[in-house]
Image: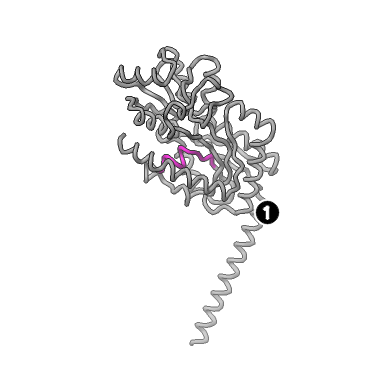
């Protein structure tokens, strides 16, 4: 009887080892042939915004570099959270990727513990794509030319509405941080994308918006909205007349609204390495670099490990601020 037990156990062990080897071999073959099927890149914001633009730039380059089909799929809503949750639930086979960002992966989880994912445990952080400072733009009809004048008008009127690309986005957080720091009464109006918020500023439906420079730049140059401050560390060469918040006395308002490429947790390192190298090559190619520079978009060359550490540092920086502001809402 004892020998029979040993035999059964041994057989079970052999079968388990065989199954593991078969799975490993299948996974290795799948990794080596990747991407044999179309890869979806989920842009969790509306078309036309920085997230969507970067998604399409990198998708086009990945197709040529990795000899596969890369399709951008827009799933907007919840400041990027809806698309992020969707990708976090997909298999880690490299066939579903996501454009992550400050709003969806740093601020939203801090504001809502039940957001549906853990940024550091639910995702594989692949590559930094680009970051844009946030601009405070106002309607020309408002009749203000400086942050001081904007603040004075808000106090005189008992408050002004400001827009952002959604609840829990970087623009939302920076607007709230400015309001609390400067003691300016502002009311947040969330939009489904920065372009929609800027359009409402142009039309005079809202007084101002905190949006990425890349989203506002065209309308600022056209004179349809007026930029009165930016969150870059120094004045932008593209907009030398726009002061930084730091020089105006708000040192905490130095930040980039960044977007990146991520996937579900547990993606094979070989696929991650391929994607990281190809993404960096795409964002730093001469043609793309010129395009991004014109929109004041900064690109960081980070390995997957370096980028993962960067995301953790952003959580450590903005998480406490987001939670503090969230308690006052």
Left or right of residue 175, residue 9 in this image: right
State the image quarter where residue 245 is shown. top left
Q: Residue at x 48, y 47 (%)?
A: 312
Q: Nearer the viewer, residue 14 or 87?
A: 87
Q: Number of callouts in the render?
A: 1
Q: Is residue 272 visible?
A: yes
Residue 176, image x and y in percent? 37, 31
Residue 28, image x and y in percent? 64, 58
**102 relative to 11, above or below:** above
Q: Residue at x 60, y 47 (%)?
A: 303
How dense is the environment of label 1, judged by Cα within 10 Å: few (below 14), some, or many (20 and up)? few
Q: Which residues are magenta?
A: 98-109
Q: Quadrant of the C terminus?
A: top left
Left or right of residue 272, residue 257 in this image: left
Q: What SS does tag 1 mark?
A: helix
Residue 132, image x and y in percent? 53, 32
Q: Residue at x 41, y 25 (%)?
A: 163
Residue 104, image x and y in percent? 46, 39
Q: Is residue 240 magenta?
A: no
- Scheme by which the image is coloured: one colour
Q: Which residue is mark 1?
A: 32
Left or right of residue 139, residue 156 in this image: left
Q: Nearer the viewer, residue 2 or 207?
A: 207
Q: Is residue 206 visible?
A: no
State the image quarter where residue 189 is shown. top left
Majority secondary structure of the magenta segment? helix
Q: Residue at x 48, y 20 (%)?
A: 227
């Amino acid at each position: 009887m004892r020998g029979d037990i040993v035999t059964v156990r041994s057989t079970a062990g052999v079968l388990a080892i065989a199954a593991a080897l078969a799975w490993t071999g299948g996974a290795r073959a799948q990794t080596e042939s990747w991407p044999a099927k179309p890869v979806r890149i989920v842009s969790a914001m509306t078309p036309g915004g920085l997230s969507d633009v970067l998604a399409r730039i990198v998708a086009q380059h990945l197709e040529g570099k990795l000899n596969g089909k890369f399709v951008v799929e827009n799933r907007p809503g919840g400041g990027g959270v809806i698309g992020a949750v969707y990708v976090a639930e997909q298999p880690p086979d490299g066939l579903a990727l996501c454009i992550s960002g400050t709003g969806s992966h740093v601020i939203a989880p801090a504001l809502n513990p039940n957001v549906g994912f853990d940024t550091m445990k639910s995702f594989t952080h692949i590559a930094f794509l680009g970051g844009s400072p946030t601009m405070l733009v106002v309607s020309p009809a408002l009749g203000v030319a400086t942050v001081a004048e904007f603040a004075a008008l808000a106090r005189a009127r008992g408050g002004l509405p400001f827009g952002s690309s959604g609840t829990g986005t970087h623009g939302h957080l920076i607007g709230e941080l400015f309001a609390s720091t400067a003691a300016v009464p502002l009311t947040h109006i969330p939009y489904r994308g920065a372009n929609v918020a800027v359009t409402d500023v142009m039309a005079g439906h809202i007084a101002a918006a905190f949006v990425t420079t890349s989203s506002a730049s065209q309308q600022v140059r056209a004179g349809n909205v007026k930029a009165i401050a930016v969150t870059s560390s120094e004045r932008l060469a593209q907009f030398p007349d726009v002061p930084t918040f730091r020089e105006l006395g708000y040192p905490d308002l130095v930040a980039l609204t960044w977007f990146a490429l991520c996937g579900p947790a547990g993606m094979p390192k070989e696929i991650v390495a391929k994607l990281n190298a190809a993404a960096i090559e795409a964002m730093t190619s001469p043609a793309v670099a010129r395009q991004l520079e014109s929109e004041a978009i900064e690109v960081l060359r980070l390995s997957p490990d370096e980028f993962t550490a960067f995301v953790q540092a952003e959580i450590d920086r903005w998480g406490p601020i987001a939670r503090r502001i969230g308690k006052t809402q």
